[in-house]
């Protein structure tokens, strides 16, 4: 499967990224819809994974303060490596922008995914939107 990663501002990917996040976070995981949308979408860079036919598979965002968040992969695309491609694109953008480190709040079950690319857990597990999370960080420079 050919996959393309597009990095773009929110204004260019809003509808597609929202649809993926809604399917994953609101419908699958039961995150209240009012918690999913926030003021950080507009100033962030967004990665969108697209299949060869143009269909969207995954998304994630890079906030201006170096946080990565809202990583979401549609169920049909999980296990294909597309999540890693989105994460790689966001990390590359952070390096291009000169960020010294990255921070993210990983759902606890996904912590090993982030650890494989050098993120380290900081602190204890906590709950966010009713889901166990851990804070993780990675130094870039």
Image: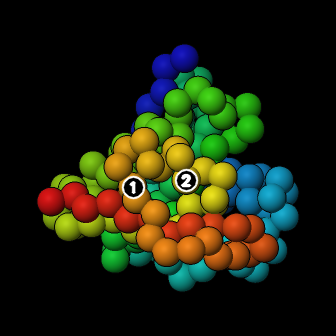
Q: Is residue 41 left or right of residue 130?
A: left
Tell me the residue at 32%/60% (across/down). Answer: 138
Looking at the rendered image, the quarter that the N terminus falls into is top right
Specify the farthest residue to the top: 1
Tell me the residue at 77%/52% (across/down). Answer: 23
In space, the residues marked 1 and 2 are separated at their CA atoms by 8 Å
Tell me the residue at 63%/67% (across/down). Answer: 133
* Label 1 SS: loop
Tell me the residue at 78%/73% (across/down). Answer: 130
Residue for badge 2 = 111
Looking at the rendered image, the quarter that the C terminus falls into is bottom left
Residue 59 appears anywhere in the view: no
Residue 67 appears anywhere in the view: yes
The one nearer the camera, 22 or 123, is: 123
The reply to whether discs 1 and 2 touch (Cβ–Cβ < 8 Å) is yes
Specify the farthest residue to the front: 124
* Label 2 SS: helix
Tell me residue 73's x, y (percent): 63, 44
Residue for badge 1 = 119
Tell me residue 139's x, y (percent): 25, 61
Tell me residue 79's x, y (percent): 63, 30
Q: Label 1 crowding class (10 Å Cα cut-off): few <14, some 14-19, many 20+?
A: many
Q: Is residue 59 above or below residue 25?
A: above
């Amino acid at each position: 499967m050919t996959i393309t990663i597009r990095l773009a501002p929110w204004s260019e990917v809003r509808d597609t990224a929202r649809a993926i996040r809604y399917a994953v976070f609101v419908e699958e995981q039961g995150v209240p819809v009012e918690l999913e949308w926030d003021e950080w979408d507009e100033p962030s860079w967004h990665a969108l994974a697209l299949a060869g036919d143009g269909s969207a598979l995954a998304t994630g965002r890079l906030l201006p303060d170096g946080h990565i968040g809202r990583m979401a992969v549609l169920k049909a695309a999980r296990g294909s490596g597309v999540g890693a491609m989105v994460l790689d694109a966001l990390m590359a953008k952070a390096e291009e922008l000169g960020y010294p480190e990255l921070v993210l709040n990983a759902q606890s079950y996904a912590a090993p995914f982030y650890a494989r690319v050098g993120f380290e857990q900081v602190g204890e597990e906590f709950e966010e939107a009713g889901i166990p999370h851990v804070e993780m960080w990675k130094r870039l420079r």
